[in-house]
């Protein structure tokens, strides 16, 4: 099952994903996808290092949907995280 | 209001210096997240879905206009221009950066505020009757004792690493507006022999996974016995509360496992051994704290009754606002006014920086600069002259803050839910929004009458769903958000835990389900009977039948 | 293992400053007390620690398992234990003040690099809202003392020196002490004089005596006579039965004769722990100590701050001579223990007290089979560093 590594950035708590060039970015669509367990292990190792360097916290792998080509969130929770905002229209317009 | 002296200010400076140091050690890697987490939680700092969340204490819900303006400043400078009144009379900011927190805490300290013990397994901010000092049915102002409890519990050497969080609520009134039955320890100020005043103590209430209504622990405690008795209660809990299972660690589990009588016997034995220890404050210290809560000197302000009646007759909105949001004050020339933060389009309890400033202005002009936050996520102006009600209404109307729906079906308590919270299983705010829209017609809402509808996004029950006349609990059902409905809960003097009605509903089915429940109630109610009274009379069956059909 | 001495913050209580660590100088022996210990097990641990001269070590399985805090607090308050209490296992620097204020003296830490954090943590607060299990008054909210307890004690001493009248001195003490005033009486001549003065001054005090179950019958008769004479109540404080049973089981009926440690353990169980328990919550403690009584008491001041008990210890007779005392007692018809007339000067428990010859050191009648140094039962040992003398 395709998956990506996600976490929160230590300094500001923002939702981040591991990218191809080993950066932690906020756009899920540009995240690096692991196609199998072996690839995922590599991503998890990178995440552990970043945790040790005080870059991120609470890293975990999450399943993604690749129907549109780019990785997309599957669960409600991950959709809300990836959107980087709550789902309340009135609130998002105001802020 | 309690005003800080040099001691209190020095303490805050020390606390903030300590926390700044802890944040620095975390950023440098000297503290791991596992080590830092309990330390940051002890200072109200959570990590949520999108950012850190800082929960700021509003001790016993009491706030000054100056403090509210500072909260507005913080919302603008370090958040996205909003704050959120919590279901325990606090405020939380949902878009906080870790690196900013030490500066935010310093800004709070400038107005004698803090985030101490708004989370963590320690004694949390004490909640109290939001009408304290103004209510007509008050035995004594509970803020005096809430402040004493605040000081006593702040950085308590023995009770900072308890098995689980610990919540106090206190009321000094006949009518419980602090939900004391749903707290680890609930305190009711009562009259004693020869005109004395003392405390009735309740223990073991709570919501969450295993809801309980608190049981009576002690019929009467003298003021000079309060702290030593509470220490004995906390010590028995600290030593014997479960630490092996997060869900069984609250005091309610201990009390119900060994029984209230066994728990009481242990506490009384402990108390007999330690009560002489000078734990309770000396009389002069109680008097010093009491002196901060001297009732304001409210001059006579006769109301122009004719003009008032005329406005009510001409302006249905004003009339409804007076009916629902203006509450009797112990001084007949004055009123307690509720400012509702509940109308279509607003997540329950969200307040913008501008609204905070408008409300602060209103408090300065009309309420001796005093404000209160309710656990139902509204704001109270405690001392408004009836003669000023029209002017206040007009001012609040400009700010869009005159929803006249206090204690109606649209005065919903809701937690932030899955839109913000890491613990949530489902969203709360969109459900609140849908129900608010469904009952947007104020006449219909008023026709339904007093109704407490509470929504929680998970079993932790921050949205008090167990205590709602109608409770809604978000659950995860194979990856989709579902909602379970309970009926018959009450947070008041007649406290009860709601009964689960039946299988859960998908999000889109919830407004219809609520409609069906309300229609059933309207069809069954006797004259003047509230929803809760009807439910208690007829039970769950008629509601189950209309909702799920007869089986 | 490194040790952090938490008391460095407290010893400098007025400044709350930590200065230097004192690692490695602590006694190695420790009696471990599990956080699940019930009352019976706590009594057993105390007796064992007292007999062996051990610290009591409370292990923390996880730093946020807070049971150890309550346990230390119980050892201090319910049991009156004043020996070293040590935190072992997982404790973190951010807990230093919680540990200290709950009654711990020391913490065992595995990582010496963390020592600066511990020291910083110990000095991180200028004051606290609650009383603490040790040193309650100095840390209490309303006693965010502009003036340190030590200098208040010195002021009180000066006031006492300014008058020779004993009732007047009692008045001054009652006025200066911010809370409950305790008077422990042995029913000896000094204490009878003070009892008389308390009665004369009309001051309210918690008057009590420690009944060790080993007193002379004359002493107990003096108690009864004094109560009747002054119309006062003297509370009789007895040793804890569990502690006594534990002591007998470990050291036998005559353990106090066979070794100094055994004798001191007996004093500890029968007198010191009951005294500590009774004094808890007290703001001032009046005693009948006089400088003339022994070489060890030659420096007794009128008033001092006892940091470990958290109270002012006041000795209104400290400057009196034997003659002054005799004159006061006879001028005022103060009832005295008839044993004084038979050559008994310092009267304690019957098996441990004898009459002395004229000219002998007044304390020579106590524990005469031991050598001369340190003939104290432990009631009047001040300061943390001398605890080994008690045990």
Image: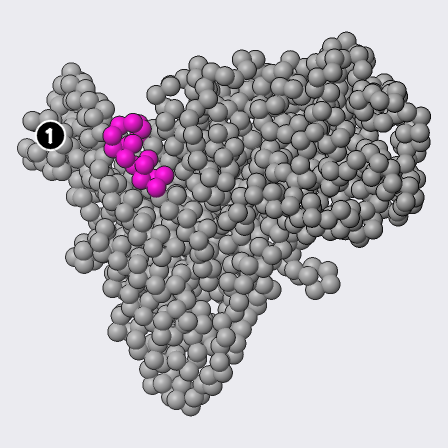
Residue on which the image places disc 1: A23
Element class at badge 1: loop
The structure residue drawn at horizontal position 52% and vertical position 54%, both measured from the top left corner, is B146
Q: Residue furthest bottom?
A: B306
Depth check, front residue: C90 or C154: C154
The residue positioned 41% from the left and 86% from the top of the image is B309
Which picture quadrant has residue A47?
Answer: top left
Q: Residue furthest top?
A: C258
Vertical position of residue B458 compared to residue B538: above or below: above
- Percent from the top left, x then y, of residue B97? 23, 43
Q: Position of residue B121 (x, y in %)?
A: 45, 37
Quarter occupied by the C terminus of chain C: top right
Left/right placement of residue B497 relative to residue C203 reads left
Q: Residue at x 36, y 65 (%)?
A: B65
Rendered position, C230 above or below B477: below
Would you say residue C220 sits in the magenta stretch? no
Q: Residue at x 85, y 27 (%)?
A: C345
Which corner quadrant holds the N terminus of chain C?
top left
Left or right of C82 on screen, residue B76: left
Query: Main SS of the magenta segment?
Result: helix
Would you say residue B504 is visible in this rendering? no
- Point out residue A39 in the picture as x, y percentages from the top left corner: 13, 19
Location of residue B145 (image quadrant): bottom right
Which chain hosts label 1?
A: A
Depth check, front residue: C184 or C334: C334
Indicate left or right for B6 with C113 as reference: right
The magenta stretch spans residue B27? yes
Instruction: Please tell me in which quadrant of the rendered image residue B252 appears.
Output: top right
Q: Residue B240: horizontal and vertical position, in percent?
A: 57, 31
Q: Which residues are magenta?
A: B17-33
């Amino acid at each position: 099952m395709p998956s990506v590594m996600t976490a929160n950035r230590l300094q500001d708590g923002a939702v981040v994903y591991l990218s191809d060039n080993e950066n932690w970015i906020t756009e899920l669509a540009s995240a690096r996808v692991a196609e199998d367990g072996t690839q995922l292990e590599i991503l998890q190792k990178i995440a552990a290092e970043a945790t040790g360097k005080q870059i991120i916290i609470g890293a975990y792998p999450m399943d993604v949907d690749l129907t549109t080509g780019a990785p997309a969130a599957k669960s409600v929770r991950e959709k809300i995280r990836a959107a980087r905002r709550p789902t309340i229209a009135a609130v998002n317009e105001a802020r | 209001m309690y005003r800080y002296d040099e001691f209190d200010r020095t303490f805050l400076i020390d606390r903030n210096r300590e926390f700044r140091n802890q944040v620095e050690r975390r950023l440098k890697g000297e503290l791991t997240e596992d080590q830092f987490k309990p330390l940051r939680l002890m200072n109200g700092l959570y990590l949520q879905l999108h950012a850190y969340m800082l929960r700021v204490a509003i001790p016993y819900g009491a706030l000054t206009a100056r403090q509210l303006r500072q909260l507005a400043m913080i919302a603008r400078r370090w958040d996205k221009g909003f704050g959120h009144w919590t279901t325990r009379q606090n405020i939380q900011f949902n878009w906080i950066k870790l690196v900013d927190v030490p500066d935010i805490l310093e800004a709070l300290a400038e107005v004698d505020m803090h985030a101490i013990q708004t989370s963590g397994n320690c004694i949390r901010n004490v909640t109290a009757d939001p009408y304290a000092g103004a209510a007509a049915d008050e035995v004594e102002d509970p803020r005096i004792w809430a402040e004493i409890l605040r000081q006593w519990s702040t950085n308590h050497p023995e009770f900072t690493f308890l098995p689980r969080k610990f919540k106090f609520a206190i009321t000094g009134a006949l009518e419980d507006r602090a939900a004391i039955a749903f707290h680890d320890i609930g305190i009711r100020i009562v009259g004693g022999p020869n005109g004395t005043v003392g405390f009735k103590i309740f223990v073991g209430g709570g919501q969450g996974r295993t809801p309980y209504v608190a049981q009576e622990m002690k019929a009467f405690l003298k003021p000079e016995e309060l702290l030593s008795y509470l220490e004995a209660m906390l010590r028995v809990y600290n030593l014997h509360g479960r630490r092996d299972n997060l869900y069984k660690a609250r005091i309610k589990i201990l009390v119900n496992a060994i029984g209230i009588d066994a728990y009481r016997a242990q506490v009384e034995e402990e108390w007999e051994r330690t009560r002489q220890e000078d734990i309770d404050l000396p009389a002069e210290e109680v008097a010093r704290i009491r002196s901060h809560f001297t009732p304001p000197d409210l001059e006579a302000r006769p109301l122009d009754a004719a003009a008032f009646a005329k406005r009510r007759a001409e302006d249905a909105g004003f009339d409804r606002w007076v009916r629902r949001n203006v509450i009797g004050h112990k001084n007949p020339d004055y009123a307690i006014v509720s400012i509702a933060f509940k109308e279509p389009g607003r997540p329950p309890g969200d307040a913008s920086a501008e609204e905070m400033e408008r409300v602060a202005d209103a408090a300065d002009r009309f309420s001796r600069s005093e404000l209160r936050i309710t656990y139902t996520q509204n704001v109270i102006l405690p001392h408004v002259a009836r003669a000023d009600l029209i002017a206040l209404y007009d001012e609040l109307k400009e700010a869009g803050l005159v929803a006249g729906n206090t204690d109606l079906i649209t005065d919903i308590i809701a937690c932030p839910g899955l839109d913000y919270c890491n613990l949530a299983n489902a969203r709360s705010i969109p459900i609140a929004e849908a129900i608010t829209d469904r009952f947007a017609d104020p006449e219909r809402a008023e026709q339904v009458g007093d109704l407490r509808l509470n929504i929680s996004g998970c079993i932790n029950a921050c949205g008090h769903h167990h205590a709602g006349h109608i409770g809604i609990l978000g659950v995860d059902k194979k990856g989709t958000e579902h909602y379970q409905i309970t009926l018959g809960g009450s947070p008041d003097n007649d406290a009860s835990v709601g009964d689960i009605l039946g299988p859960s509903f998908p999000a889109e089915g919830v407004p219809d389900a609520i409609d069906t429940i309300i229609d059933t109630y309207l069809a069954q109610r006797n004259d003047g009977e509230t929803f809760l009274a009807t439910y208690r009379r007829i039970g769950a069956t008629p509601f189950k039948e209309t909702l799920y059909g007869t089986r | 293992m490194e040790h952090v001495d938490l008391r460095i913050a407290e010893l400098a209580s007025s400044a709350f400053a930590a200065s230097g660590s004192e690692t490695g100088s602590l006694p190695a022996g420790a009696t471990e007390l599990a956080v699940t210990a019930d009352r019976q097990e706590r009594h057993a641990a105390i007796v064992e620690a007292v007999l062996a001269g051990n610290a009591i070590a409370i292990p923390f399985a996880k730093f946020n398992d807070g049971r150890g805090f309550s346990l230390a607090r119980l050892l201090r308050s319910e049991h009156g234990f004043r020996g070293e209490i040590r935190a072992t296992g997982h404790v973190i620097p951010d807990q230093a003040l919680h540990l200290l204020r709950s009654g711990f003296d020391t913490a065992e830490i595995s990582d010496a690099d963390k020592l600066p954090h511990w020291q910083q943590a110990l000095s991180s607060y200028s004051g606290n809202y609650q009383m603490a299990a040790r040193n309650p008054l100095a840390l209490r909210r309303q006693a965010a003392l502009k003036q340190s307890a030590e200098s208040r004690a010195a002021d009180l001493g000066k006031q006492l020196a300014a008058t020779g009248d004993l009732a007047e001195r009692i008045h001054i003490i009652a006025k200066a002490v911010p809370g409950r005033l305790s008077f422990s009486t042995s029913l000896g001549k000094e204490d009878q004089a003070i009892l008389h003065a308390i009665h004369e001054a009309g001051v309210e005090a918690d008057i009590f005596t420690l009944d060790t179950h080993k007193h002379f019958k004359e002493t107990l008769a003096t108690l009864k006579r004094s109560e009747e004479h002054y119309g006062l109540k003297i509370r009789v404080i007895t040793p804890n039965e569990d502690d006594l049973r534990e002591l007998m089981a470990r050291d036998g009926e005559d353990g106090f004769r066979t070794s100094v440690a055994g004798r001191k353990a007996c004093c500890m169980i029968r007198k010191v722990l009951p005294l500590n328990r009774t004094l808890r919550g007290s703001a001032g403690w009046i005693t009948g100590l006089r400088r003339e009584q022994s070489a060890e008491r030659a420096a007794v001041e009128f008033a001092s701050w006892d940091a470990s008990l958290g109270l002012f210890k006041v000795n209104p007779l400290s400057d009196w001579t034997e003659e002054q005392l005799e004159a006061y007692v006879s001028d005022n018809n103060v009832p005295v223990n008839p044993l004084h007339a038979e050559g008994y000067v310092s009267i304690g428990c019957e098996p441990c007290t004898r009459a002395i010859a004229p000219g002998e050191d007044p304390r020579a009648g106590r524990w005469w089979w031991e050598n001369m140094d340190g003939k104290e039962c432990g009631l009047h040992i001040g300061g943390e560093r001398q605890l080994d003398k008690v045990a």
